[in-house]
Amino acid sequence: MVQIDVPIAFAVGGLFADAANRQIATGRAEYYFRAFSTNLLFQIFFFSWIPVYFLLNYFGWETSHMWWEADSVSNYPYYLPIFLVVFFGAAILGFLLGASLVRQGRLGTNRVIYLAIVAYAGGWIFGQLNRTAKLGTWREWHANPARTPWFYQDQTFLIMLIGTIAVWAIGMAVLALRLWNEGKHVDQRMHAIAGR
């Protein structure tokens, strides 16, 4: 849902800054840009296309049946471009803020920020299941929410939801762990240099 996609993109940026905290703390530009690039690669290949797919195919669900009354995103010609700019802006800002906090030695603050966003997203989804678990258009949902289908009643939607969650979670875990493990080697190199 767009109401959580943008904040989650921001949070993931902070998470990648956290995963690369040892590298970023060295102040070396190559480590910083490798972590920054990892964040962008994740957002491009493992995340940004997911909300676009659901906006194109399940507009009512992706917008939680709020504010946009038309049946399709195509009725709003500026919606997708604006969404993508805001999405990537949030992803970049999340990383920049996270990296800034890491450099200041405030890793805990960075973690609180991205975990609070995850809590917000969970609250958004589970706090209003009558909207977030229902498919159909805005018009159908507002006419009679009880008659709109549950998400699990649409096989294509369910397969795509499970598949995209797997792509997102596995991609994030692999890339974050790669940065984290790279950071362990940075620590070992720093100790070796300091010991000389």
Image (tube, rainbow, N blue to C red):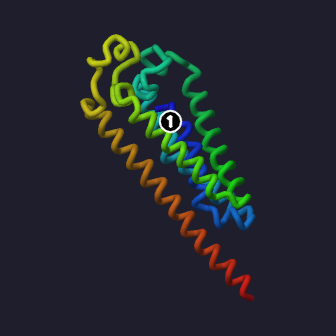
Rate crowding at label 1 as few (under 14), some (14 to 19) or many (20 or more) other CA atoms within 10 Å.
Answer: some
Residue 190 is left or right of residue 129, and the answer is: right
Give the residue displayed 39% in from the left and 35% down from the top.
126
* Badge count: 1
SS of the residue at dot 1? helix
Name the kind of residue labelled 1 in the image: Ile
Q: Quadrant of residue 152?
A: top left
- The answer to whether 85 appears left or right of 174 in the picture is right
| In this view, 124 is above or below 131 | below
User: Residue 37: x percent and y percent?
Assistant: 63, 54
- Image quadrant holding the C terminus, namely bottom right
Query: Where is residue 40 drawn, in percent x and y?
Result: 60, 49
Question: Residue 82, percent across and down?
Answer: 61, 28
Query: What is the quadrant of residue 186 in the picture?
Result: bottom right
Q: As rendered, which of 38 and 61 lies closer to the eye?
A: 61
Where does label 1 land, which residue?
4
From this view, report whether residue 72 is shown above or below residue 114. Answer: above
Residue sticking out furthest to the top:
143
Determine whether, in the image, residue 9 is placed left or right of residue 103.
Answer: left
In this image, 78 relative to 132: left or right?
right
Above or below residue 158? Residue 112 is below
Q: Residue at x 35, y 17 (%)?
A: 141
Residue placed at 72% from the left, 67% from the top?
26
Question: Closer to the camera, 59 or 105?
Answer: 105
- Residue at screen point 64% across, 58% down: 107
Whether residue 55 is situated above or below residue 75 in the rendered picture: below
Q: Residue furthest bottom?
A: 196
Q: Position of residue 184 (x, y in %)?
A: 58, 73
